[in-house]
Image (spheres, rainbow, N blue to C red):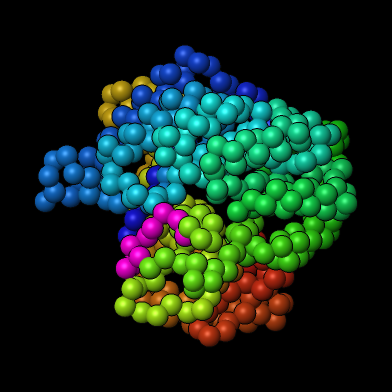
Amino acid sequence: MSLGIYIHIPFCQQKCTYCNFNTTDFQDALASAYVPAVAREIAYWGNQLKDPAAKPASPSFAVDSIYLGGGTPSIIAAELIAVLIDACRASFHLLGDAEITIEINPGSMSRQKMETWRRAGINRASVGIQSFIDRELVSLSRTHSSADARRTVDALRESGFDNISLDLIAGLPEQSLRDWEFNLEQAISLRPEHLSLYLLEVKDGTQLYSQIKRGLRPSPDDDLAAEMYIMMHQATTTSGYEHYEISNFAKEFVVPAASRIAASGVAASRIAASGVPSGGLFFDDQQKPPETKATNMRSVHNMKYWTGATYYGMGCGAHSYDGRSRWINIKKTESYIGAVASTGRGVAETSVLSDDERAAEALFMGLRLAEGIDLAAFQADYGLDVPDRHGSELARLGDAGLIQIASGRLSLTDRGMLLSNEVFVSFV
């Protein structure tokens, strides 16, 4: 199975009030030292994963997704981003149709950067808009305006990006239902291929948490947030998006048979007549295609997290998972650079999951997806009969209208999507 690579870029112009991610202030000199360290770590893991039977210079594991997250990856020089992607190509077998995503802050953009990213192979942009209302952006300490966000999306299109995801946050302090409706309307009007729509979580240690504790900001209204969640589901599904994960929505395309390209099972880069981006629909040339076929623009990389696939995290504070073990890198940027210089890697802590831990984690992560869990396949993979182990909890959650079992699959209901944390704690 193909694996994913996550690359963490910790630098930010300033910390957002809601953010508890591993970030640090941007400094040119530190960024210039950090990128070579990450490239060295990429080479280290590439060497570790090589097939002993392969030639020394032949990467063994296929990679179908790279995700540059942060922090603010778009804040550093585009040429440094290209160095990291080249390092992945040199150390792994990067598939020709791999999804390569960069997270973007509209306040740190230029057309020159976008064009350099495209030349480096980046084909997906995740834009951290968060709101189209300027007063909300100011309250979040965002460094861009709503006009910047719209210009950024336009510039991405002009630079050739045909796979764009937009991030928005619902349930902000002082945010009304009409405010959220406006944000949804603005986002959908830009016709992104993907939307990540999150309900605000106030995390201990953030500026927002401190503001609320001191009475400077009101606490989020849970009932209002529930109305916002229902609104986002309705607005996206009626606009042609698949609500495929609790907070994620992918544009769906229906492609006429005449517009599809027979590719003998090999992914082609584009369905030219339909305009559907890479990752579209293909059929075996020995079979007659159906009249129409639907496809969508799910995040290839994020699906790895929810399905228990292997991914390697590079950079300070990055997480990795290989199906059995999890490890996290050193968080402090300077300490990470020093560790990589000494050992080639920056691992701070490793944990080996027990069979029960693997099964529990796979269960609640898989339930994040709309299609849920195939119970027979789950038992085969993890040796756990879910109805037998969790029968009483399943009955209680079913009676509460939070889960359903149909055609051998366990999944959340629409109500369960909204109250997912109440479900997940039952399986931990």
* Residue most extreme to the bottom: 407
- Give residue 363's position: percent from left, percent from top: 50, 67
The image quadrant where one finds the C terminus is: bottom right
Q: How many marks?
A: 0
Seen at 71% across and 42% down, the residue is 130
- Give residue 16's position: percent from left, percent from top: 68, 32
302 or 378: nearer the eye? 302
385 or 273: nearer the eye? 273
Note whether 346 is above or below 4 in the view shown. above
Note whether 49 is above or below 416 in the view shown. above
Note whether 35 is above or below 348 in the view shown. above
Seen at 50% across and 16% down, the residue is 28
- Magenta stretch encompasses residue 265: yes
Seen at 53% across and 85% down, the residue is 407
- Horizontally, is 8 left or right of 351 in the view? right
The image quadrant where one finds the N terminus is: bottom left
- Give residue 66's position: percent from left, percent from top: 42, 44
- Magenta stretch encompasses residue 59: no
- Give residue 263's position: percent from left, percent from top: 35, 65
Seen at 51% across and 39% down, the residue is 102
Q: Which residues are magenta?
A: 263-271
The secondary structure making up most of the magenta span is loop
- Horizontally, is 100 left or right of 253 in the view? left
Residue 84 seen from this side? yes
Residue 210 seen from this side? no
- Horizontally, is 276 left or right of 355 in the view? right
28 or 86: nearer the eye? 86
